[in-house]
Image: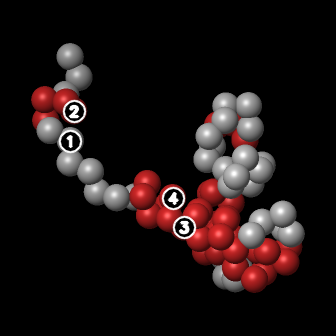
Amino acid sequence: MDPEKCFGKPCVRGLRMPITSILAYLSSGMTIDDLVREWPELEREDIYQALAYAAWAMEERIIPAEEASVT
């Protein structure tokens, strides 16, 4: 994440391709092959890393109540 690129959103390898864009394209029905064909600067591994980041970001986290409360 770089505050100077894509408003600080997580991007692929410093490219101006936000992870959210890759996920949106995949959810619309594009395949990995479609993405790589459309954006030749992307590699298959970039797509897999975007999916891994999304999985990590969605993991359940338990926050103890004393840390979660606002003082």
For discs 2 and 4, the disc positioned in front in the rendered view: 4
| Circle 2 residues within 10 Å: few <14, some 14–19, many ≥20 | few
> Could you tell me residue 24's position as x and y percent?
64, 66
Q: Do residues under tags 3 and 4 come within 8 Å of each other at their CB atoms? A: yes
Marks 2 and 1, how far apart at CA = 6 Å
Sequence-earlier tag: 2 or 1: 1
Display colour scheme:
secondary structure
Q: Quadrant of residue 33?
A: bottom right
Residue nearest the viewer, comparing 28 with 18: 18
Residue 18 appearing in the image: no
For discs 3 and 2, the disc positioned in front in the rendered view: 3
Q: Tell me, for residue 52, which label it has, or none.
A: none
Amino acid bearing label 3: Leu
Marks 3 and 4, how far apart at CA = 5 Å
Sequence-earlier tag: 3 or 1: 3
User: Where does label 2 land, which residue?
Assistant: 68
Judged from the image, the secondary structure of the residue bearing numbered disc 4 is helix
User: Where does label 3 land, which residue?
Assistant: 51
Amino acid bearing label 4: Tyr
Q: Tell me, for residue 63, which label it has, or none.
A: 1
Amino acid bearing label 1: Ile
Q: Quadrant of the N terminus?
A: top right
Marks 3 and 2, how far apart at CA = 28 Å
Sequence-earlier tag: 2 or 4: 4
User: Where does label 4 land, which residue?
Assistant: 53
Marks 2 and 4, how far apart at CA = 24 Å
For discs 3 and 1, the disc positioned in front in the rendered view: 3
